[in-house]
Image (tube, rainbow, N blue to C red):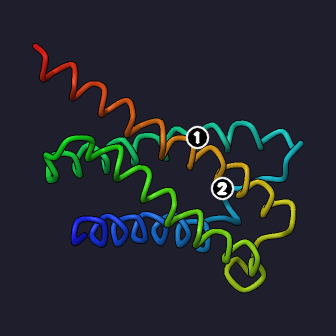
């Protein structure tokens, strides 16, 4: 049980880091969907997110050597993050006061990709760990 509380806290920290990034830099890195810069910005944000999630998940799997630790981290982190994001998006005028409605849509697009990565990356790392154990 203590392990799940730790993972939940780490998931909350990942969510907080991502949210604060967009609170402070969202105006500069998000562009309205349909604009010329939207796809480039989204691609760079997703690439950076994938790299950071890969590193965080890898570090967590070094810390927690239990079976399926990466999968547990990804699943619980996604649950925690999506729960917090439901409230932050419902109150986006308070959480992201400087973002226009079209930039909130861009944030939501990024967020959807980010949570897909939050599930896929731990699954890939878990499979690599299983294959490495067989060798």
Give me the residue at 77% from left, 71% from top. 99
The reply to whether callout 2 and callout 1 are in contact (CB within 8 Å) is yes
Q: Which residue is mark 1?
A: 44
Name the residue: 52% across, 38% down: 47
Q: Is residue 101 toward the left or the right of residue 70 in the image? A: right
Q: In this rendering, is residue 97 above or below 118?
A: below
Mark 2 secondary-structure assignment: helix
**Residue 53: numbered disc:** none
- Helix, strand or loop status at disc 1: helix
Q: Nearer the viewer, residue 10 or 52?
A: 10
Q: For the N terminus, which image quadrant? A: bottom left
Q: Residues within 10 Å of mark 1 (few under 14, many from 20)?
A: few
Residue furthest front in the image: 1
Of the pair 37 and 83, the residue shown nearer to us: 83
Q: Which residue is mark 2?
A: 29
Answer with the quarter of the image where residue 84 lies.
bottom right
Residue 49 position in % (x across, y down): 49, 47
Placement of the C terminus among the 4 image quadrants = top left
Residue 38 placement, left or right of 48? right
In-image side of 7 versus 82 (left or right): left
What separation in Å lies between label 2 and label 1 (alpha carbons)? 9 Å
Q: Provide residue 79's location: percent of width, then percent of height.
A: 51, 61
The vertical placement of 1 against 70, above or below, is below
Against 128, is 79 above or below?
below
Identity of the residue furthest to the bottom in this view: 94
Please state the horizontal and vertical placement of residue 14, each as a whole percent of the image.
42, 63
Foreground of the two, 109 or 128? 128
């Amino acid at each position: 049980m203590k392990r799940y509380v730790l993972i939940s806290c780490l998931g909350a920290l990942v969510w907080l880091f991502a949210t604060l990034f967009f609170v402070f830099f969202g105006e500069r890195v998000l562009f309205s969907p349909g604009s010329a810069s939207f796809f480039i910005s989204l691609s760079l944000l997703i690439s950076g997110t994938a790299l950071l999630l890969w590193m965080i998940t890898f570090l967590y799997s070094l810390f927690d050597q239990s079976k399926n630790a990466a999968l547990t981290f990804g699943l619980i982190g996604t649950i925690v993050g999506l729960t917090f994001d439901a409230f932050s998006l419902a109150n986006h005028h308070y959480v992201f006061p400087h973002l226009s409605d079209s930039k909130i849509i861009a944030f939501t697009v990024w967020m959807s990709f980010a949570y897909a990565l939050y599930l896929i990356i731990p699954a890939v790392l878990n499979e690599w760990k299983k294959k490495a154990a067989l060798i």
